[in-house]
Image (cartoon, rainbow, N blue to C red):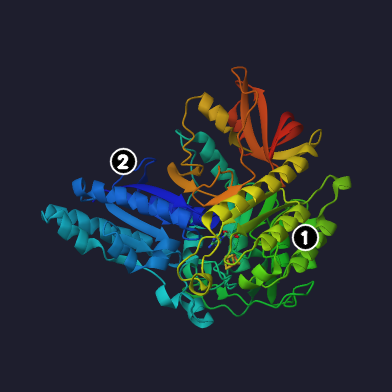
Amino acid sequence: MSRPRVYLETFGCQMNELDSELVAGQLHALGYRFVDEPDGAQVILYNTCSVREHAEQKVWSRLGELAIRKQDDPALVVGVLGCLAERDGVALVKRMPVVDVLCGPGELDKLPSLLDNAYRTRQSLLSDRVTATDADRRSAGQIALQGSSSRRSATLAAAQDSLEMLDLSRATSPLDTIDDDHPTAGAVRKRSAYVRITRGCNKFCTYCVVPFTRGAEVHRPPEHIIDECKKLADAGVIEITLLGQTVNHYRFEHGAAVTIGGVIQPQKGRSYAGGHRRDPFAGSNVTTFADLLSRIHEEVPSIERLRFVTSYPRDFGDDVLEVIRDHPRICRYLHVPAQSGSDRILTLMNRGYTVSEYLEFIDRARAFLHEPEKGRTLSLSGDIIVGFPTETDEDFAATIALVERARYKNCFIFKYSARPGTTAYDKYEDDVPDAVKRTRNNTALDVQSRISDELSREAIGQTFDVFVEGLSRMEEKKRERPAKNCGGGVSLTIGGNVIHSHAGEASGDDDDCGCSTAAIETPSGTASGETTQFSGRTDGDQIVFFDVPSGASTDELVGRIVQVTIERVQRLSLFGRLSGQR
Ligand code: 5AD
Ligand code: SF4
């Protein structure tokens, strides 16, 4: 049976983007072919997000369209992956019988066999001339969810977690070739990569579905992580972003892991109480987050940029800050969501820190890492939720005061979205009217925009190392080559497979993530017939646009680090001229 053409679209966070990349790599190795439009696909996969209602609604509407298409195309296989699949489970299939495959984020390693079964079933049903309705009913059974066992015991998790194989498979699969149709995206993919260090989350913030959909915190063995970084580096990657929901909680106890089939299985995380300045578990049989950062920096020297997201504002020891300060290739960029500036709301959110503890942390981080006299500065970014149940004008004013005080480079502002299954959904009425949420959202955005603008202006005249990501959007438009941006998302190309993604970063107002950010990038500038405009990022994650004379080779710039001197700014975007190249 020939392998089908697959269309894979990703919603949500960087963790989802990585999952999609790994899934695509696995399927690609098995011979599946990827297409960049759903029209010609025989398999359509949506890797979903259920963190906010907005992203979820997109998936529902896509599934509604597919239900109509499937009436004429009964062989079509539809798969829902990720957090929405995990949260709604079989109820999702009942609501949308068009769905053949359901696979939670903790079971993605099983996707190839689920998909194979679904595809074969549908093909054989068709050849048996069974009606589409029967076929729908009979193949809608390819389901892999963690379900109620998603928060398993440490021993079981260690013994059963074959998910680690998914991350490992990426490191061993041949690296991607640059796609002819999307050379820029392909090149970026080769030079910049995500590496997961921790799965799941143990924090149970009352508004958040993640601990339910992604399960308990599990840390990957440092050897696996470092091997993966080395293999990526050998394949040409120079920028690595380590991923974890609470990435600074990383801690691996050696000797506590179980080995199955020659593979060390990951172990569950062990959290510790806040208030300390150093990881109290540091010692010979523990790899702390600080140890991990320093080992990657030392053992994989060709990685020119090492960054990590997302940090939890508590439990961030001085040991980590020292490692960042003392290792030049670790980016001085921290994404540390505060969520609210009101202690009362933070308690209702179960965030586990007060405003003054949060501010103490960012002051401490600045004391360690903000050294403009040495040409090294700290960039902070944050997340804020407005309109959490019972939020008053006074609470919101406190949030604005925190945003003013934190002086984030950029901040993602979300309107509270009541999520079924969370504590807040069960316990608190969603009582802040949408109009009030919208007004607060806009107010917070305005404040952040002004701060972003002020911070950007400080960059004028300075020269930055810039990791070149590709042609600017304006340049892409100029060339009449659609940038494959799906409503503010980005497209990644992996082995010639275009993976559509809707991420919060670099997005327009109220995108698929339901977030708005003051970091709206609308490149404007001098791109003309004589020059080509590129975009890239500083190590503090600021977006930079620069022009080079037309005719310059894209390959010489994309995926490389160049020096750009900033001449003007527009909100978060910096515009400059190329002043050096390594
Ligand atoms: N409503 C609004 N925003 C949310 N986030 C998480 N859950 C919700 C929700 N129910 C935001 C938080 C988090 C970011 C990834 O998404 O700010 O940091
Ligand atoms: Fe969700 Fe809180 Fe965990 Fe972040 S720390 S993933 S907001 S539960």
Count of marks overlaid on the render: 2
Q: Residue furthest top?
A: 530
Q: Residue 167: give x, y in percent of width and height.
A: 51, 61
- Left or right: 16 with respect to 445? left
**Element on which disc 2 rests:** loop
The residue sitting at 78% across, 67% down in the picture is 356
Q: Is residue 468 above or below residue 541?
A: above
- Left or right: 403 with respect to 115? right
The residue sitting at 61% across, 59% down in the picture is 385
Identified by mark 1, the residue type is Ile
The residue sitting at 20% across, 63% down in the picture is 138
Identified by mark 2, the residue type is Asp
Q: Residue 250: give x, y in percent of width and height.
A: 65, 68
The CA span between labels 1 and 2 is 48 Å
Q: Residue furthest left?
A: 129
| 515 vs 467, nearest the viewer | 515
Mark 1 Cα shell of 10 Å, populated few (<14), some (14-19), many (≥20)? some
| Ligand 1 placement by image quarter | bottom right
| 257 vs 104, nearest the viewer | 104
Mark 1 C-beta to ligand 1 under 8 Å: no
- Left or right: 419 with respect to 139? right
Q: Is residue 269 above or below residue 193?
A: below
**Element on which disc 1 rests:** helix
Q: Which mark is residue 28?
A: none
Q: Which residue is mark 1?
A: 362
Q: Residue 493: give x, y in percent of width and height.
A: 48, 43
Q: Which residue is mark 2?
A: 39
